[in-house]
Image (cartoon, grey):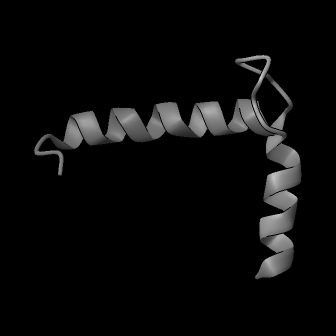
Amino acid sequence: MLTSEHTAKEIEQKAKKVMGMLKRGVKFMPTQPNVIAILEKLKQSK
């Protein structure tokens, strides 16, 4: 649990930025799984 609201908001903003990059197909590591395919499978299972 984070005690600082500012720190929590900063982490959330960075996480949203990274998720956006992953959805656009940016790969951070060569062994990274296919994020787009995983998201599609999760959407289908709902």
Extreme residue toward the bottom, this view: 46
Q: Total number of numbered labels?
A: 0
Q: As drawn, is 16 to the left or to the right of 30? A: left
Residue 14 position in % (x across, y down):
49, 30
Q: In this view, does 38 lie above or below 3?
A: below
Q: Quadrant of residue 33?
A: top right
Q: As drawn, is 22 to the left or to the right of 7? A: right
Please give the name of the residue rendered at 17% of the width and 51% of the height, measured from the top-left corner: 1
Q: As drawn, is 12 to the left or to the right of 5? A: right
Please give the name of the residue rendered at 80% of the width and 23% of the height, measured from the top-left corner: 26
Q: As drawn, is 17 to the left or to the right of 13? A: right
Q: In which quarter of the image is the C terminus?
A: bottom right
Q: In this view, does 19 lie above or below 41?
A: above
Please give the name of the residue rendered at 57% of the width and 40% of the height, measured from the top-left corner: 16
Please give the name of the residue rendered at 72% of the width and 17% of the height, measured from the top-left corner: 29
Nearer the observer, 39 or 17 = 39
Q: In this view, does 29 lie above or below 6?
A: above
Residue 3 position in % (x across, y down):
10, 45
Extreme residue toward the front, this view: 31
